[in-house]
Amino acid sequence: MLNKVSEKKSNKVLDSVRYWALLNFGVLLLSVSMYMFNEPNHFALGGMGGLSIVLAKYITPAISFLTQPVLLAILNGILLVLGLIFLGKDMTVKTIYCTIAYSLEVYLFSFIPLERPLTNEPFLELVYAIILSGAAHAIVFNCRASTGGSDIIALIIKKYSKMNIAPALLAADFLIACLSFWTFGPLIGLFSVLGVFAKSFVIDGVIENMAKTKYVTIITVNPEIVAEVILDNIHRGYTKYKAEGGYTGEERTIIITVCRRSQAARLKASLHEVDPTAFVIITDANEILGKGFSERM
């Protein structure tokens, strides 16, 4: 009994470490995209990062200490107040953490000399900016957090409407991207608008891929053994009911559970060891709402 309690505590700690590692990885990707690709090319792919790039064009020459990273921190601070009002404490606390980490990382990157773009191929750099920022936003959203800025606006739109997060973020970012036409000219403006639209598709695709889960149906004559594997190995609940074999007429137990893809692989391997006669059906489940899975934001 003590071993099971200790194992559950260990798994909770491990899950927490994985969560924060994934969240910080998403923030790091966004920071790299901003400093290495967006800022040098003046890509305003929406968000407060894009708006801070536009504002820095006019403000920094007049007030030297108001650099792009400083302006980014100020803008995010203003929107955090809105997040606290409309999104609640839990989401806002995570957003505060991501906002501070994002602003700090962009600021630290500024000590690395980068006076011009990495290459002479702006479209290539736009592709990298789209992939990195799109994946970053998707990872952070999947962790039920945001990096502040227009993410907060998008989450507010999603909460009070039927829009998914990607089109909501697109709506919030489009106007900021359009400002780059006036600030940096038609070429950068076209790149920015294209990037905003492409980023929304990347976000949608990555979120959908990360949200995919497995629906597992197990037909067995050893329900106690299978139930123990589900509870102890992948730490999921299950539903079971009695059934009768159509050919043999023998009684069987059908057990249903849903889990992450990595958990389904562990479950399949464990079942093969403890109950090799079990009939196992594993199918994709695009979205599951409920405790332990997705919740409507």
Image: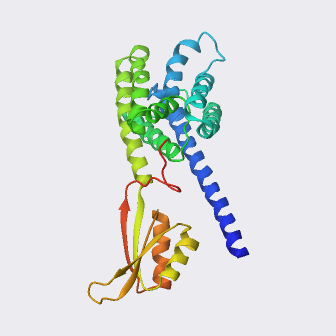
Horizontal placement of 33 versus 277: left or right?
right
For residue 14, above or below residue 225: above
Residue 117 visible, this orientation: no
Closer to the camera, 280 or 204?
280
Instruction: Indicate the quadrant containing the N terminus: top left, top right, bottom left or bottom right.
Output: bottom right
Residue at (39% x, 25% y) in the render? 174
x, y percent for residue 139? 50, 46
For residue 232, above or below residue 60: below
Horizontal placement of 226 versus 277: left or right?
right
Q: Quadrant of residue 59?
A: top right
x, y percent for residue 279? 37, 80
Picture mark count: 0
- In this view, the residue farthest toward the left is 247
x, y percent for residue 239? 46, 69
Q: Quadrant of residue 163?
A: top left
Closer to the camera, 212 or 184?
212
For residue 282, above or below residue 202: below
Give the color scheme: rainbow, by chain, secondary structure or one colour.
rainbow
Residue at (56% x, 32% y) in the render? 148
- In this view, the residue farthest toward the top is 62
x, y percent for residue 274? 50, 84
Residue 176 visible, this orientation: yes
Horizontal placement of 155 versus 64: left or right?
left
Residue at (50% x, 33% y) in the render? 151
- In this view, the residue farthest toward the right is 2
